[in-house]
Image (cartoon, rainbow, N blue to C red):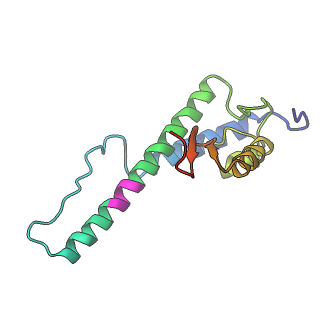
């Protein structure tokens, strides 16, 4: 679609792969850390229970966010093996190196991503998230 964007060089691919592996290593909640102890202190008052609930809620949110990112990293690393890393999933053109440095798990070129975001913001009834791959119902009318 956008033929003026060149394929990534070997040096760029190595840089991006290293960045993905580094991001994977820096995740706080590893895949082995599946037992997240969410405890409530025995005999605590309401304030302590509220603080514990708030903390546990944030820990779960962070863990879920990291798990989602870890899956995206694995998907990107598999694309290296298939020699498909750096190609837009929608139009098939190459994604710019600068975009991949900023977001190494990007699956869409900037043009397709902007178009997807415009489509998402223009459809109030059934917004679809390209990142999550699901419909987000903001009206409560859809099943």
On screen, residue 33 above or below 60: above
**Residue at 17% across, 63% down:** 40
Task: Report the side of 94 relative to 48 (left or right).
Answer: right
- Residue 63, position as x, y percentages in the image: 39, 51
Quadrant of res 88: top right
Residue 55 among those drawn in magenta: no
Q: How many marks?
A: 0
User: Which of the pair 34/98 is nearer the observer?
Assistant: 34
**Residue at 56% across, 47% down:** 137
Q: Main secondary structure of the magenta part?
A: helix
Q: What range is drawn magenta here? A: 57-61
Quadrant of res 39: bottom left
Q: From where the camera sits, is residue 32 visible?
A: yes
On screen, residue 78 above or below 19: above
**Residue at 78% across, 44% down:** 115
Hey, which residue is sitting farthest left in the picture? Answer: 43
- Residue 69, position as x, y percentages in the image: 51, 45
On screen, residue 58 above or below 45: above
Q: From where the camera sits, is residue 104 visible?
A: no
Task: Report the side of 126 relative to 67 (left or right).
Answer: right
- Residue 25, position as x, y percentages in the image: 45, 46
- Residue 113, position as x, y percentages in the image: 73, 44
Task: Report the side of 117 relative to 24 (left or right).
Answer: right
Q: Quadrant of the N terminus?
A: top right
**Residue at 70% across, 52% down:** 121
């Amino acid at each position: 679609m956008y033929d003026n964007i060149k394929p990534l060089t070997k040096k760029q691919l190595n840089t991006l792969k290293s960045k993905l592996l580094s991001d994977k290593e820096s995740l706080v909640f590893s895949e082995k850390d599946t037992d997240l102890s969410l405890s409530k202190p025995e005999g605590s008052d309401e304030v302590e229970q509220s603080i514990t609930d708030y903390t546990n809620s944030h820990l779960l949110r962070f863990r879920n966010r990291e798990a989602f990112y870890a899956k995206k990293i694995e998907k990107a690393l598999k694309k290296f093996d298939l020699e498909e890393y750096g190609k837009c999933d929608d139009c098939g053109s190459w994604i710019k190196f600068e975009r991949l440095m900023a977001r190494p798990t990007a699956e869409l070129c900037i043009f397709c991503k902007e178009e997807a975001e415009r489509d998402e913001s223009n459809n109030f009834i059934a917004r679809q998230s390209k990142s999550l791959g699901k419909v987000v119902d903001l009206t409560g009318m859809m099943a």
